[in-house]
Structures are given as structure tokens and as C-alpha cells.
Amino acid sequence: MNVGLVGIGRMGEVLAKKLAGHVDLWLFDRDSARTKALANELDVSVAASLSDIAKLGTVILAVPDREVISCIKEFNQINQPLTVINVATNVAQRVLNEAAASHIKCIGVKLVAHAGEMALGLEPVIIVNERPPELVEAAAEIFKPVGKVVIGRADIVSSINITAAQAALTAAVQIEENLQLQGITDEVIIKSAIRQVAAGILKAYANNDLGPFARDVVQALKTKLRN
């Protein structure tokens, strides 16, 4: 199956590496030198333009939110039936549908994930939007090599990722400021506390692998939140 991937930023590059070998992958990005280098590394093809990549029939948009609609508008001008799979978290299915011409079919496929963690080998959860139903099966099949595929309302990923990101960043800033208040100002130590201790405990919590001390802390926090 021929699949085009537009955008090889952090997420796009990870997706390219996951998809290469599972589909006949073509890449397109404005940074042509970087695109050619990645294509050579993965032994996949390069498209010269959005018009060329549209000829494949199926295109994944792994571009920033603000560029998704610009790409769709350009596809609208091409007399070519096309399925567009959008992975940008904050572009809703309704927005895709409103932007696309009649010969363009769009579906959201969104990742509860962090590109850096995926690059380390962690498997994300991928929510394939339940509508339009005729695109669900093909989109799910394409993304099987990437992670655990779930069918549902893909737009909820925006709320999930924002909630997680805000909580994590709040914790990181609080750790930094609290350590500084204790007179600990060495940036290397502070970053290690965030990267090793805090992030490690979060992963252990997600994996149900907390030690006794951390489990006691969790119980105390849950009790406090309930009261």
C-alpha cells in the first residue's frame, strides 16, 4: 500500500521509522535535504511536492496544527481523490470536514504519546476516529505498527494530552522552585531530579511498579484529594 507522509519533524520522523517496511512509504517536507537523508536511511521514497504525494491516494499529515488546513486547501486544488489522515492533536474532525473539498476524505488518528518516548521504543495508544466509518479500517491497519490502536473519538486526545502536559510541567516547575528555595541551585542537580526522580516515579506509577514509600505517598495524596 502506498502511503505519503507529509512532515518529518519530531513526530513525523518517529512515524516514518515505524511505518517504513510496513507500507510503501513516501516522504515530503519543505526541508528537502533532511527528507532525502531520512529517506536514504529508511530506504523509502521522496515526493517532490504535495501534488505528487497526493497521487498516492493516502496521505498522513504530521505537520503543526496551523499547517494542516493549509495542506488540505492545497489538496483541494488538485483533481485527485485522496484520503487524508491527520495526526495533529488540536485539529478537530469537524474542522477537517469543513476544510476539505468533496474529493478529499479526512480522518483523525491521534496519539496519546510523546515523540521522544516513542523514539526510545515506548508504544503509544492511538485513537482512530470512529467517523467516517469507511476510512476506519484502513487507517487502523496503517497505524498497527506504531502502537496500540483503539477506535473511538480521536478528538478527546487533545484534552488527554493537554491535561497530562500541564500537570507534568506544573510538577517540573514546582520541583525547580522548591529546590531553589532550599538553596539547591545547581542546574544539573535540578534537571536530574526532574528527569530521573520525578519522571521515573511517574513511569513506575503508570506501570504499577511503585515501591513502598511511593505507594504510601500516593495513598496519602488520594486521601487528601477525596477530602
Image (spheres, helix red, strand yellow):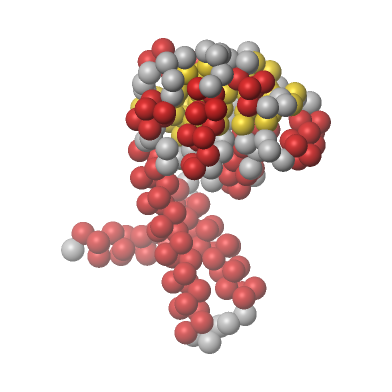
Q: Residue at x 57, y 23 (%)?
A: 59
Residue 153 x %, y %: 35, 30
Q: Residue at x 61, y 47 (%)?
A: 116
Corner quadrant of residue 7: top right
Q: Residue at x 37, y 64 (%)?
A: 217
Q: Is residue 49 shown left or right of residue 172?
A: right
- Say which quadrant the C terminus sits in: bottom left
Q: Is residue 166 shown left or right of residue 85?
A: left
Residue 189 x %, y %: 61, 74
Residue 210 x %, y %: 46, 55
Q: Residue at x 50, y 74 (%)?
A: 176
Q: Is residue 126 visible?
A: no
Q: Is residue 126 shown left or right of residue 51?
A: left
Q: Is residue 67 visible?
A: yes
Outermost residue, left side: 227
Residue 165 x %, y %: 44, 54
Outermost residue, front side: 77
Instruction: Name the residue nearer the viewer: 62 or 210.
Output: 62
- Say which quadrant the N terminus sits in: top right
Instruction: Name the residue nearer the viewer: 46 or 180.
Output: 46
What is the count of numbered marks?
0
Corner quadrant of residue 48: top right
